[in-house]
Amino acid sequence: MTDSKNTNQTEPAVRRQPATERASSPPVFVYESAGISERKGNVPIWLWLVVASLLIWGVYYLVAYWNAPITPT
């Protein structure tokens, strides 16, 4: 009388698919719920420059503006 199958089960959100570019390349992971794929890649040079410049600016700001202003007595 009762159905033995559990209809509330969902498929995993991550499915492993083989890479189609080269046979020796690592597998590509596809997140089906979001529609994006994950692969090994390099960070662009411009992004490294942005990160480095923000870190340098942060250190400068910390040193320049951390102390209270000196008032003449």
Image (spheres, helix red, strand yellow):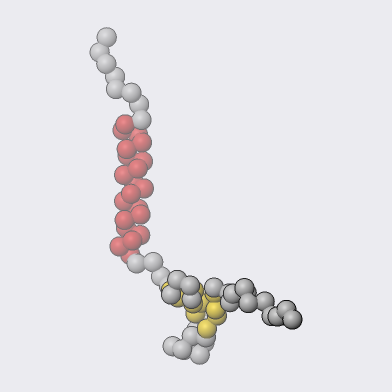
In the image: residue 61, left or right of residue 31: left
Residue 34, can we see it?
yes
* In the foreground, 33 or 24: 33
Classify 60 as above or below 24: above
Q: Quadrant of the N terminus?
A: bottom right
Q: Is residue 63 left or right of residue 25?
A: left
Image: 68 above or below 50: above
Identified at 31% across, 33% down, the residue is 64
- 41 and 9: which is toward the camera: 9
Instruction: Please tell me which residue is depicted at 52% across the width and 83% down the height of the picture.
Output: 17
Residue 60 position (above or below residue 51): above
Please name whichever residue, 4 or 25, is drawn nearer the observer in this view of the structure.
Answer: 4
Residue 39 appears anywhere in the view: no
Give the farthest residue toward the top: 73
Q: Residue at x 70, y 80 (%)?
A: 3
Q: Residue at x 73, y 79 (%)?
A: 2
Q: Quadrant of residue 15?
A: bottom right
